Amino acid sequence: MMNKQLLVVMLMLITTFIGFGIIIPVMPELIKAADPGLLERHTGLMLSIYSAVSFLLSPFWGALSDRIGRRPIILTGIVGFAASFILFGIGSDNLTLMYASRVLGGLFSGAVTSVIVLMWRTSHRRRSGQREWDWSVCQSGSALPSGLASADC
């Protein structure tokens, strides 16, 4: 049976992946309302900027979590990630606020990647087969949003 800490870690990762994926189908409609002429450009830039910021700042968050601990970094990441969604909702008719939200989301999703290191260290002591099962459950969270987005409703 999985321990509580590992379950919390997996739930945080799944929540972050769902948070990233759930906004993708909604974003073009919000952008269209704000600036219909450049819909494709803004959609591509907002998706790219989130990933780029996350990619660039993940090493910073990792080094900081090594210094001060993973728990404060993960909690900071979750709170900041939630704040980015609040900002996106508030600024749904303002492109500047939408871009700021995506930068903020990328910044704090990089902090949440510390969860991956925590999960690896937590499961490192376990049997290899159990560790692979834990990872597969965790990774299924990244496929869930894309599966929901492509479902015929």
Image (cartoon, rainbow, N blue to C red):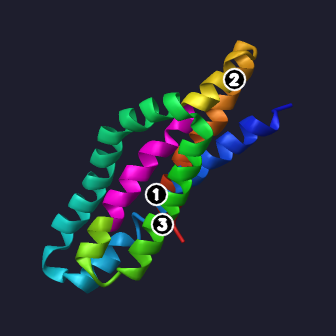
Compared with 5, 144 (above or below) is below
Q: Residue 123, labelled with which disc?
A: 2
Label whose residue precedes the other's in the sequence (3 or 1): 1
Q: 71 above or below 146?
A: above
Q: Is residue 3 magenta?
A: no
Main secondary structure found in the magenta portion? helix
Residue under numbered circle 1: 21
Picture residue at 30% right of the left edge, 74% below the top: 97
> What kind of element bears circle 2?
helix
SS at mark 1 in the image:
helix
The question of residue 110 being in magenta is answered with: yes
**Given the image, on which type of amino acid does mark 3 rest?**
Ala
* Gap in angstroms between the C-alphas marked 3 and 1: 16 Å
Q: Which residues are magenta?
A: 101-116
Picture coordinates of residue 46, whole percent (x, y): 27, 61
Of the 4 image quadrants, the one containing the N terminus is: top right
97 to the left or right of 117: left
How far from the left and from the top, in percent, is residue 3?
82, 33
Locate the C terminus by quadrant: bottom right
Question: Nearer the N terminus, badge 2 or badge 3?
Answer: 3
Residue 83 image label: 3
Query: Which amino acid, by three-letter code, is at mark 1?
Result: Gly
Q: Amino acid at mark 2?
A: Ser
Q: Would residue 61 appear left or right of 37 to someone viewing this image?
A: right
